[in-house]
Structures are given as C-alpha cells and as structure tokens.
Image (spheres, coloured by chain):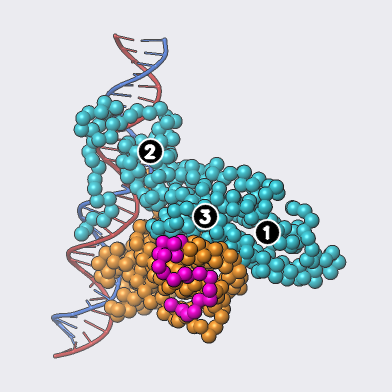
Chain colours: A orange, B cyan, C red, D blue
Amino acid sequence: MRARPRAPEDAPKLSPYQYGVATSKAKPPRTRLSADERERAIARGAVAFFCEAGFGGRTRELAKRLGITQPLLYRYFPNKEALIDRVYQEVYLNRWDPQWEELLDDHTRPARERIIAFYRAYAKAVLSYEWIRIFMFSGLRGMDLNSRYLTLVRDRIYTRVIRELRREYGLPSPAEVPISELEFELVWALHASIFYIGIRKWIYGLEIPEHIDGVIEGLTVAFFDGVPAVMSRVVANAAKTRARSRPGSPRAGRRRAPGSA
Amino acid sequence: MRARPRAPEDAPKLSPYQYGVATSKAKPPRTRLSADERERAIARGAVAFFCEAGFGGRTRELAKRLGITQPLLYRYFPNKEALIDRVYQEVYLNRWDPQWEELLDDHTRPARERIIAFYRAYAKAVLSYEWIRIFMFSGLRGMDLNSRYLTLVRDRIYTRVIRELRREYGLPSPAEVPISELEFELVWALHASIFYIGIRKWIYGLEIPEHIDGVIEGLTVAFFDGVPAVMSRVVANAAKTRARSRPGSPRAGRRRAPGSA
DNA sequence: CGCGCCGGTGATCGGTCGATAAACACGCCG
DNA sequence: CGGCGTGTTTATCGACCGATCACCGGCGCG
C-alpha cells in the first residue's frame, strides 16, 4: 500500500463537449450556463460539498459533483479560500431573522409561549445539516466566526430571554441588577440542549425524535420550571453585593419589575 | 500564488546525529529512546497533535513536534490510520470510570446530590481539550465511535438518572413503565448543557466561567426542579396507553415506586 | 576488541493537491 | 459566412503528502 488511501474511484471519463446533446450513454448532460448562473451553481454546490467533506475536501471532487471540470472553479473564484469564504456567506448571511427579536419582545403573549415559539423558529433555521456542520468545521478550523456569531446571539437573544424570565418571576430587571454569569449559563443550557439535537443527528449520526417541536416545548417548559429557584437566589445575591458595593444607590431588592429595558 | 498555502515554514535543518550531545546551538537535543518508550512518546504526541490539527494533520509536522524525523513514525506504526486508531484508544480507552455507575446507585445519598457529584466527576474527565476535539473530529469524519460511545452513556448513565428521578418524584419505575422518548430527551438536555461548555471553550474559543462545579450544580438543581412537571405528565400518558394496549396487565398507575431496577 | 543489533536518518517514489495556461466549442454580430 | 467573445476543457506545473528503502552509528554482548 503505497499510494494515498483517499479518492479510490477515479473520474468517470466523460467524453468532452456534449453540451446538452444527451448522447444515450453520456451520464451528466453538460450544460452551458451564463456567468452568474454558473457562479451561483458553484456556490450552492460548494456549500453542499464542504459541509459534508469539510474544508479539506478536494476541488476536483467538488467539480465532479457539479458536473464540471476542476479548472472551471478557478474562473469564478480566485482560489479555494475564496470559495470557502463564499460558503460562510451563503450559510450565515441572511439566515438571521430579525423577527426573532420582535417575537421575544411581543408582550401581548405570555413569556413562556414566546420563548417556545422563538426556539421553534430558531431550531427550524439552525438545525440543518449544512448549518450545524459548517459551524463545527469553522470552529475546529480556528475561525473567529463562531465566537462573533455567538456574541450576537448572546446580546440579542440571551439578554432578552433573561429579561423576560426576570419579569415572569418578579425579579428586578437587568437595568436594575445586571445579568449574572450563572443566569447566562442557564440560558446557554437551554440553547445547548436544542443545538445539541442537531449535533447528535448531523455529526454523530444518531437517531433523534421525529417531532422536534414537542421536544422543544418540553425542554422549554422544564427550563421555565427549573430556573426560578436558582435564578432568584443568584439575583438576590447579586443585588445584595451590588447594594453593598454602592451604598448610596437605591436598594434593588425583591420587588415587582416595573417595566422592560 | 501557485503553491499550496499550507505549511509556510520549512524544516529547521537540524544537523543529524547529535544524540544528546547538546551542542550549544542545537535546538532540540535528540535522545535515543528504547522501543516502547519511543512508541509511547509518539502516541502521546499524536494525541496532542491530531486533536489540535485534526486528522488531516501532516505526519511531517507531527514528527517535527516530536523532535524526530517522519520515517521514524513508520517504524512504530504501519501507517497513518493506525496512528489515528491509537489516538482513539489513548483518549477513550480507560477514561470510563466504573465508579460513576456505582455513584449513581448509592442510595445512601440523596438523588440530587448524587447526580451533581456524578456530573462533576464526568465533567472533569470529559471537558478537556483533547477529549472534546477528538470527539468532534471523529464525529465529523463519519466514525461510528461517537454513536457507540453515546449508546453506552445512554444505557449506563441516562437510564440510571431517569430511574432515580422517577424514584425521587414517586413515579413508577422503568420496569413498570418503560422510559419514554421525552424523558431521554430531558436527560440529553442536561448532558448537552454540560458538554457544550467544553465545546464553547475548546472549539469556539469562547470564555467560560471559572468555577465549573458551581455551574454544574446550578444546572442540575434547575434540572431537578424543571423535570417533574413534564415528566409526570409524560409518564402518566405512557402508563395509560400501556394499560390500554395491554388490558390484562396490572395497572401501572401513579403509586410509589417500590424498588430500584 | 570487533561485530551485530537496532533506533534513527536521508533520499526518494508514486500519487494527488491547488492552481495555471492554452486550446477548444458554441453563439452572436456584422 | 468568417471573426470574435466567452464558457469550458485538456494538459500540465510545482509543491507536498504518505510511505519505502538503504544506510548510518552508538551500545552491548561475546
């Protein structure tokens, strides 16, 4: 065994120049596309390919799946890295739905119901083969993309969830008593519980429940029931130390939170 | 830019055959080890290297880090795949502590305390750079190692946790009413919450709380408070449908679970 | 004191990688 | 109907990968 063990089968040796003629034995009838059509086709194929094979996937293999030759990739992208950057764009850009934040802010509905609805919508967007695997590959590659994205999630989502929880259980608002580390950890836990369903399925290859929405509801309900005891304790502690450290400030104790942030 | 962008710096061109002489300018003083010492050194280095670079890491780079030449690897391991297999062994084999199961079975302590103690011990074993990254890399590579390991976790740990939860909240034992899918999901959620702390740190490169034990305690307490409402409902449903589908069997209703499995 | 054993290295092989260059084929316009 | 622009392919380059082989040199045994 001398050669590399990879790529056992070689190219199917298609006869060239068969633009759409569809000879009886020709496997992929090659089509001649316009520049931007081809560019989009490559981008789409690159997403599907790299999220399966990882960013170490070979450009020849990608080209084969697209039904084109490898040098054609380099007419549309200067190099492999540019192709990978495009994959990041394709997967993350415009996958963030601003309605999520509006949903969490909609005070006409009960907090529990809003958070369940949010995580259902979020799960639908994020619990996909492409999203989960690209996210993991980029993390393992040392990209800061993950930390930047998750900072966004923390600032836009976690803070809102915690604010609503505080309201729900009559604790002081984050403006009065800043959010503690442990509170963030509690929301991290809910987030992780849901995200990990995708990891189990698309990275470990495990079976997962058929009806995710029911699971999300169960997890969120358990979250709501489990959080208050821990949270009220930690918020009370934070309020106390805060009051101690700033003796002149008004007591931010255990009273009904008046308004939202 | 024509060449591959990888491996920008080349080998430092060490003068050969300097076994331990420690010439003033020689950077790594090469030592001549016995066969099994060298073999263990390579295995150790391979773990550190592959969990950082992934299994696509180059053997020459590994050798450089070990202070040896690349062909020497092939004196101790027939090929790269054998080296990777050894990494799996090194990381997973004998990292499973049988005391974990004993700990969960120890009925002299309260269930909540036992589960906190277990997850502290488990986190200490599993929440390491090597373990988490190797686990992810192997999953993304399509190994069935992950699913085999997690099946073990489910059978040995999750079932015990659920059994203790049922006992704690006066629900029928798993022998009477089999464990439902949603109950497994609840325990998956706790597990994921803790495991994800490691992912955040060693894959995403995020900061995590300094005192993990406190976080684990908070998560487990919230878990215990949150679970019973969801769980008693789902167990009652399961018991009902079970009684309906097997009319001759004794009613496994809402009574004190008499003993453990 | 010589010699064989064995840990270790240098050189190199076949193969594959990313990337480039030149030629080709089809559609369009004049 | 011939030239030209553009989408695509063939052929190939230099680099580098995993793996092999011949050889080297210090240590220990007789």
Label 2 or label 1, whichever comes before in sequence order? 2
Q: How many numbered circles are shown?
A: 3
- Residue B214 has which mark? 3
Q: Give the extent of the magenta segment.
A: A241-261
State whether residue A29 is above or below residue A137. below
Q: Is residue B220 magenta?
A: no
Q: Secondary structure at mark 1?
A: helix
Circle 1 sits on which residue?
Answer: B165
State the residue at coordinates (46%, 44%).
B87
The main secondary structure of the magenta stretch is loop
Q: Secondary structure at mark 3?
A: helix
Label 3 or label 2, whichever comes before in sequence order? 2
Between D18 and B204, the one nearer to me in the picture: B204
Query: Percent x, y for residue A53?
Result: 42, 61
Quadrant where the image shows the N terminus of chain B = bottom left
Is residue B240 visible in the rendered image? The answer is yes
Q: Residues within 10 Å of mark 2 (few under 14, many from 20)?
A: many
State the residue at coordinates (77%, 53%).
B259
Query: Percent x, y for residue D20?
Result: 36, 38
State the residue at coordinates (41%, 65%).
A247
Label 1 or label 3, whichever comes before in sequence order? 1
Query: Percent x, y for residue A185?
Result: 49, 62
Same chain letter for marks 1 and 3:
yes
Same chain letter for marks 3 and 2:
yes
Q: Secondary structure at mark 2?
A: helix
User: Rounded to the nearest whole Å, what is the CA distance between mark 2 and mark 1?
Assistant: 50 Å
- Residue A223 has which mark? none
Query: Mark 3 — on which chain does it sit?
Result: B
Query: Percent x, y for residue A190?
Result: 53, 66
Circle 2 sits on which residue?
Answer: B73
